[in-house]
Amino acid sequence: MDKMHLKVSGMKCSSCEVLIERKLKEVPGVRKVRVSRANEEVVIKCDNQIALEELQKAVKEDGYILTNKSESSNNHHKPKSNHSVIRIKRRHAEIGAMFLFIIAIYFVLKQFNLIPEGVGITDNMSYGFIFIIGLVAATSTCLAVAGGLLLAVAAKFNERHKDLTGWQKFKPHIYFNTGRIISYTLLGGVIGALGSVLTISTKTSGFITIIASIIMIIMGLQLLNIFPWLNKLQIKMPKFIAHKIYDSSKKNQGSTSNTSSFLFGGATFFLPCGFTQALQLYVLGKGDFVTGALTMLAFSLGTLPSLAGIGAFSSLTKGNIQKHFMTFSAILVIILGIFNLPNGFALTGADISLTGNDANQLDSGNVKIVDGKQIVEMKVIGIDYYPSKFTIVEGIPVEWRIDGRQAQGCAQVVSAPSIGLLEFLPRNSIKTATFTPQKEGIIRFSCTMGMTTPGASFTVIANTKGIQPANLDGTENVNENSCDSNYPNCEVQKIQMEISNEKGFYPNVFTLKKNVPVEMEIDAKVQLRGCMSTLVIPDYDVVHLMKLGKTTLRFTPTKSGVNIFTCSMGSKLGEFRVN
C-alpha cells in the first residue's frame, strides 16, 4: 500500500483526531488513517495515491485543512507577510476585547444581583458552574464525536423505517440523550465512590482540584490556538474506544433501535473529551458518590441543548458566529479555571489570596474591643465570607458573631481546626462563637470542605497596647435539660451507628425520648471525606466531625417529631424520631 504524509490544521481537541480519521476512512481507496493532533499530522495508507483535493473534500465541511507536508514546511520557514501579522494582531485584539466583555458583564450582573446563586465564578465547582462548563463544551469539537454518533444512529434508524412521522424519527434522539444523562450520572457517582474507597486525603483532593483547574485553563488556551505548542499537552481516552462505539452503531438493528440508541448514548461517557476527563478527575478527588453523580448530571444537562437540537445548533454556529462563540467559550473556561485554583490551594493548606492583611495594625476596621473582649462580626453569603480576614490580639477573648442566614451548602458549617472550633450556622439567628487566642500566628477557618473564601483567617498579634482581658468567670449558658452521664442517677439514651461501604449509615433511624440527653457512638469503618465527614443536626444547631474509628456525639433532643441529621451540604443521612 502507498503511504501519504499530510499536515492538518484546524484541530481543537483530541476528538478532532477521531472525526478526521473516520471521515478519511470513508474516501474510496483509504485503508488506514492515523491522526496526531500534537504533530498536526495525518498518515494515510491507501491502495494507491489519492488526490489531495479528494481528501480535503472529506473534511472541509468540518473546518479542517489538509496540505502536503513539504508545502507546509516551506510555508513554515517563510517570513510572515504583513497580512498574516495584521491577522494575528486582530486575533489578539479580539481575545482581549472578549475577555474585558466577559469581566464587565460579570460585574454588572453582580452589581444588580442578577447572577443566580451557585453560578458565580468564585464558587468551587458549584453545579451551576459545571452546567456552564457543559454549555461551553457543547460549542467545542469535544462533543462533535458524540453528535456524530447520534446522527449516525438516527440516520440508520430512519433508513430502516422510511414511513415514520416526524415525532417517531425524533425518538432515537430522546433515547440517546436519556441514556447519556443516566450514564453520566451513574458513572460519575461510581468514580466519586471509587475516590472514597481510595481514601484520598484532603490535601490530595486539593492537588486533584488544582490539576483539574489547570487542565481547564490549558483546554481554553488550546481552543484559542494562540500557543500552538500547547497542543502537545493532551488528556484523552484511547481513540480505539470511540472507533469501537462508532463501528458498533453501524450494526444497529431497527427492531432494537430504542435500546441501541439508549446504550450508545450511555457509551459517550467514554468518548475522548478533555472537559469530561477533567471532571472525572475532579469527582475522583471529591470521593463522594452523590457529589460525583450530581457533578456529571449537571455537565450532561449543560450539553443537552446542543445535542437535542443538533441540526439547528449546527446551522447557527457557522462562520463568524462560530468563531466568536468559540472565543467566548474558551475565555470563559480559562476564567473559570483560574478562579477555581485558589479553592484547590485552600484544601492543600496554602494561601494564595491576592488580598493582604497588615499584621502590624491592631484596628483593621472590622475588630472592635469592648469591655476587654474582641468583637468580630462576619456575614456568610452563599459560600463567601464578608469580611474574611481579621487582626486580633493574643490573650484577649474573641466574641465571633457570624451571620449565616444566607449561607449555602457546606458554608453552613464553619471550622477552625487549630483551635478546635466547629459550629453550625442557624438559618434564623446569628451564631456567636467564643475563643481566646493564646499565641501569635495565623488561625485559618473555612467550611469543612475547604470551599469557602480562600485565605480566610485571623492574624494574631502581640498585645503591645496593654489591653486588659475581660474577667470571665468560665460559666456558660447550659441547656437546662442537659446532663453529664458521668454523674450517678443520670438517665442517658445511648445509641450506636456504624458507617461502612457495605451498609452506609446503619442504622439511620432512631427513636428517642424528649429532653433526655443522648450519647451517640459513631463507628466509622471507612475514611469519610468531603461533606460526609461532618454530621449536622439542624434543629439543634449541632455539628460533629466524624473521624476514622469511634467518636461520640452528645446532644439533648428538645423538639418532638422528626429531626433529621445531614452532611454539611444538607443531604439527609438519617433521622431521629423524638416522642
Image: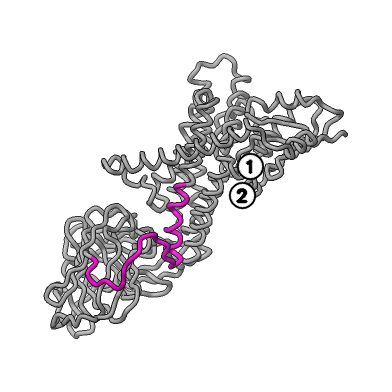
Near-viewer residue (319 or 61)? 319
Residue at 66%, 33% in the rendered image: 81
Judge the density around disc 2: few (<14), some (14-19), many (≥20) Cα neighbours within 10 Å: some
Q: Viewed as shown, does residue 510 lie left or right of 209?
A: left
Q: Earlier in the sequence, mark 1 or mark 2?
A: 1
What kind of residue is marked 2? Ile
What kind of residue is marked 1? Ser
Tell me if residue 363 is in the magenta stretch.
yes
For the view shown, which residue lies furthest in the top direction? 163
Q: Position of residue 350 (x, y in %)?
A: 44, 66
Q: Position of residue 507 (x, y in %)?
A: 36, 63
Mark 1: secondary structure: helix
Q: Which span of residues is magenta-colored?
A: 335-364
Q: Position of residue 545 (x, y in %)?
A: 34, 69
Quadrant housing the C terminus:
bottom left
Q: Quadrant of residue 417?
A: bottom left
Check disc 2 and report the residue beneath it: 235
Mark 2: secondary structure: loop
Tell me if residue 512 is in the magenta stretch.
no
Residue at 62%, 30% in the rendered image: 83
Please say if 103 is above or below 338.
Answer: above
Q: Position of residue 70 (x, y in %)?
A: 80, 36
Q: Quadrant of residue 564?
A: bottom left
For the view shown, which residue lies furthest in the front direction? 82
Quadrant housing the N terminus:
top right
Q: Viewed as shown, does residue 496 lie left or right of 209?
A: left
Q: Viewed as shown, does residue 409 lie left or right of 346?
A: left
- Report whether residue 183 is seen: yes
Disc 1 and disc 2 in contact, CB within 8 angstroms: yes
